[in-house]
Structure formats: C-alpha cells, structure tokens
Amino acid sequence: MHQTQLQGIFQDITFKSWDLEYTPHPSVQSKFKRCLDILGSLVGLLIVAILFVPIAIAIKIDSPGPIFFAQERYGLQGRPFRLYKFRSMVSDAEQLKSLVNNEANGLIFKNKNDFRITKVGRFLRRTSLDELPQFWNVLLNDMSLVGTRPPTGDEVIKYTDKHWRRLNVKPGLTGEWQVNGRSQVTNFEQIVDLDLQYQRNWHPLYDLFLIGKTFYVIFGKIGAF
C-alpha cells in the first residue's frame, strides 16, 4: 500500500476514533500486565536471538527477499504502529493478493491454500515462529503478550462501534482467538466476540492462563495451517 494511501487511512481512522467515547479497558493501566509484558518480551527476544540465524538462512534459501515482514497495524484506540514478523510469504505477496480467494467471512482475509506462502513460511506459521519478532512490539508497548488480534488499516476503516470496542485493549501476541480455534475461526464477528469476551473475563491471572493455553495450542498444533 502506498504511503499516501496509508496517510489517508490513518486520518480517517483517527477521526473515527475521536468520534467515539475513549474508554480504555482497565488492563491498559495494569502494572502487573505491563511487568509481565516486559519480562515476557525480554525472554522472547532472547529466543529470537538464538533462533534468528537458522530461521534467516531458511527464509533466504527458500525465497528471495527480506527476512522480516513489516506492516502497518492499528492498536489501542486505533493508534498505528509497525508490526514485525519473520517473512512467511513471497516478497511480492501484497501485489498478488487480488489473485487469492478470501475464504473468511467479514473484515479478515484468510486462505488455507494461499499460494503466496512459502514452504518455510508454512512451517513458521504452523509453529508460530513467524510471530517471534513481535516481542519487540511488546517491549515497545505497542502490543501486549495477551490482547486482541492487531488489525490492518483496510479492516479498521470499515469498523462499526461494536468492532471498535475490541481496540479498548492493546493488541496481543496471543488471545482468546488464538487459543480457541486459531486459524480455523474464519468468521470476523466470532473473532470480535472472542476479543470482547477477553475484556469481560480479564484478570491479571487470566493473562497467565491464556499464555499457558497458548503453549498447549502451539505444541499441539491445534487450529493452525
């Protein structure tokens, strides 16, 4: 997406967020949650440092292009930030997106057999290793270990008031959607309901529960493709 398009989307999103009542969730102010995020991100970045060389080599051998994938995403109350992942698709994936059928319902895009995903990228996604660089986003306070799925600008610009409420918490590396079906949940409204369920159920110990459940889902390869 061109810079001018991104600026236009940001202006529209900013106007839309200001038009709504600013009601951040209590978890945003939780010192326990932030301390957990800092500790978890430091451990995560240590894992990134250990695994970086083999992952980088595998990505480069499999497909030409950068090691990292960076994309504009929107977090707490529609604030933009740069999200980082290990690249799991061909380098011109955005240009080829129009050639892929969307198998999801609503304001998300998913395709189980997306031809843009590389062989190494499919392994990275199945094991969630592609998400590891997002620990940097957590350390920067753009994200949390647990929260909502960070949306793209073309999703957020179409949000209704109900959808906006999911952005009353910071986006997370994991959350209700990731531990309750993961990629098998292809209905956007169901994802929103899960995000709002997290806000209703939130407690400092609930974050620990969801983090533990995330490890079970990842190592059990539940819901990934």
Image (tube, rainbow, N blue to C red):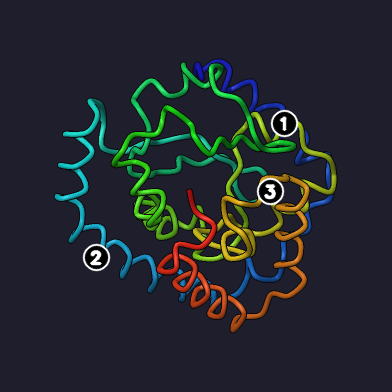
Identify the residue under disc 2.
46
> Which kind of residue does numbered mark 1 sit on?
Ile
Residue 160, placed above or below residue 218 = above
> Which kind of residue does numbered mark 3 sit on?
Gln
Which numbered mark, 3 or 2, is in the foreground of this view? 2
Identify the residue under disc 1.
157
Task: Decide which of 3, 85 is in the foreground and name it.
Answer: 85
Residue 141, placed above or below residue 78 = below
- What percent of the width, then of the height, locates residue 44? 33, 65
Quadrant of residue 103 within the rendered picture: top right
Identify the residue under disc 3.
77
Residue at 77% across, 40% down: 18
> Which kind of residue does numbered mark 2 sit on?
Leu
Q: Secondary structure at mark 1?
A: loop
Marks 3/1: CA distance?
12 Å
**Which numbered disc, 1 or 2, marks the residue that appears first in the sequence?**
2
